[in-house]
Amino acid sequence: MAQSMKGAFVWYDLFTTDVDAAKAYYTETIGWKTQQWDGPMDYTMFTVGDTPVAGLMAMPDEMPEGVPPHWIGYIAVDDLEETLAKVPELGGQVRKGATEIPGIGQFAMIADPQGAAVALFSSSGNGDETPLERSAEGNFSWAELNTTDYEGAFEFYSKLLDWKVTNDMDMGPEMGTYRMWQREGGPEGQSLGGMCNAASKIGVPAHWLFYANTGDIDAATERVKNNGGKVLFGPMTIPGDDKVVICDDPQNAGFALYAEGKKS
């Protein structure tokens, strides 16, 4: 029987206004390769070696006017229809109902009560259910919700997906609490992401931000800028001597990079 990944981010898509430019940018900046999907739509996969880690496509026609290029993460659920039924009951919104991906599974798009967009995914069980190694270079390792009410947001996700608190970290009077979470059934104490009220602090809508691993944060930061992107924050050292930098790509889709600190 396939391992249940309920509550984990298992895939990431970039919706952009310039597919060719995005391909060039991320292959040169992060080191990903690209592979065309053998399916019914024009869809490119970013890969680490031969292993797909994310997808890339033009902004869909049904995307509401004014929505900028962005990354969206897909969270695994065991029963998509059952999970979708809970979304409005918990204060969220279903933006795109259950949609079939032939031979792979189903997905849906939702927004949490604070307006942050995220996708849900249920596998058909026909593929490899083994999760990607989060610490490997080029893979995504952290999902961060920058919101306006982290306690309300956590209540939504915990009831919808059975997330549990691993730690609340005080970031001082300016930024407040940073809450880290894990999924039910995952390794005990293994945080998969965090959330805080950063969106309200900096005056932007609530949104998810995804961190991809890099070996040298300073070299990666230079590639971000030299290839036409913007550095919004960092590089900075975080607890554990790890380093992060928050960026926009040339089409203004936000992403982040993470480098593990040197351990003694």
Image (spheres, grey):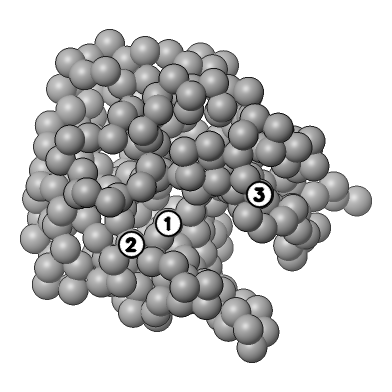
Mark number, residue 34: none
For disc 3, the marked residue is 231
In the image, what residue type sits under mark 2?
Ala
Measured Cα–Cα span from mark 3 to mark 2:
22 Å
- 238 up-or-down from 6: above or below: below
Q: Quadrant of residue 30?
A: top right
Other-residue count near label 2 (Cα within 10 Å), few / some / many at <14 / 14–19 / ≥20:
some
Precedes in sequence: disc 1 or disc 3: 1
Do we see residue 248 in this rendering? yes
Do we see residue 80 in this rendering? no
Q: Are the residues tagged 1 and 2 within 8 Å (C-beta)?
A: yes
Residue 11, position in %: x, y? 38, 38
Q: Viewer-proximal residue, 157 or 174?
A: 174
In the image, what residue type sits under mark 3?
Val
Other-residue count near label 3 (Cα within 10 Å), few / some / many at <14 / 14–19 / ≥20:
some
Mark number, residue 116: 2
Residue 147, position in %: x, y? 42, 70
Q: Residue at x 25, y 71 (%)?
A: 113
